[in-house]
Image: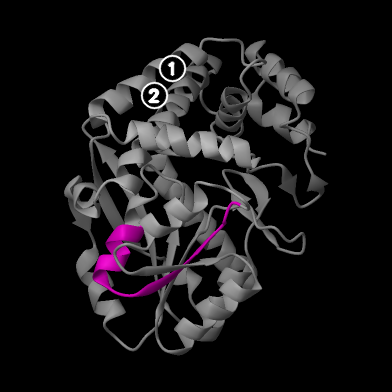
Amino acid sequence: MSKKVSTAELRLIQFLHCLPLFCVMAFATAITWLASWLPVSWVSAHRDVLLNQLICFPERSWKENRRHARRALVQTARTLAGYSHVWLRPEAQAMGRIKEIVGVAAVREAMNSNRPVLFLSLHQAAWEVPVLVIGEIGQAVVMYQPAVDSALDPVVKEARERTGCKLVPADGRGVRTALGALDQGGTFGLLADHQPGGKSNPCADFFGHAVPVPAFVHKVISRYKPAIFYVHAEYKKSDRYYDVHFVPAAAEMYDADEQTTLNEMMKGLEAIIRRAPDQYNWTYNRFRRGEQGKRDWYKKKKAMLLIERIRSGERAADVFVDSQG
């Protein structure tokens, strides 16, 4: 992303945060809904969302996936536009939109103990909000992907750290900081649905397809034996309110080999997404790599071919198995 583009994004966010929230949501809905009716060959984000729906929900009909793709695209736009209020308005306003924090008692107990704690989050609903909740409970180190030379990045980092979390980049320095906190019985969190950067990371099953996942998670679990929680938000009442959920990880993630641990982690993330699939950010090219290397599913020409085959009546499960590269 160029500096010029990121500066324009910052100015847009600054403008939106001055508007009432319902106006921000209405603006995002109108623009994205109109874009969702353009040909998918014209709108790459819509094409990626639709492709991911077809990959992950082959049991749905073509019309169902088409409808859900439009909903998910609009929902993601509403989420991103709404972050103008989360990032730039006082944190009391963002926290005031939380209706319920589910499972917080167990999290408080874990963070107040001498045992390390590991939070696994994902891009579900208002994914910027749980970090504010965690910071209010206690100190935590949270790993993130900084945007290089982005005018927006410092604003976002400062907003995420307002309640007490310390953000560190997903690099060697960040890893050392996270491990140092865990050595002291501290708390560490990360977005576990990110595509890891290194090609040496193992794969695990996600919606029936192998995807690379961060081996670092298993290393942390096997070394520190932390209490593990999934954390995610869920929208309520037209996105103006949300619940935050803390969900204990399955027992199978503890004291297991790397493959078992990572498979269970992705199973837990998938279960959260399936609760409210239209609230997940489907714009990521999450299936671009598999156990056999790169897939070409997201390349425009190939994506349009795959979409047309399914629209014409072929089973999505057969199309994506046959087209894996």
The stretch in magenta equals: 131-147
Question: Quadrant of the rendered structure where residue 231 is?
Answer: bottom left
In-image side of 17 versus 271 (left or right): left
Q: Which mark is residue 281?
A: none
Chosen colour scheme? one colour
Helix, strand or loop status at disc 2: helix
User: Which kind of residue does numbered mark 1 sit on?
Assistant: Ile
Compared with 148, 137 (above or below) is below
Q: Mark 1 = which residue?
A: 31
Q: Are marks 1 and 2 in contact (CB under 8 Å)?
A: yes
Compared with 227, 145 (above or below) is above
Compared with 201, 300 (above or below) is above
Q: Mark 2 = which residue?
A: 28
Q: Nearer the viewer, residue 82 or 189?
A: 82
Q: Residues within 10 Å of mark 1 (few under 14, many from 20)?
A: few
Q: Nearer the viewer, residue 48 or 86?
A: 86
Q: Quadrant of the N terminus?
A: top right
In-image side of 233 versus 174 (left or right): left
The image position of residue 246, as x and y in percent, is 31, 60
Which residue is drawn at the image coordinates 24% and 26% (left, top)?
Answer: 22
Q: Nearer the viewer, residue 74 or 277?
A: 74
Q: Can residue 205 be found in the magenta stretch?
A: no
Helix, strand or loop status at disc 1: helix
User: Which kind of residue does numbered mark 2 sit on?
Assistant: Ala
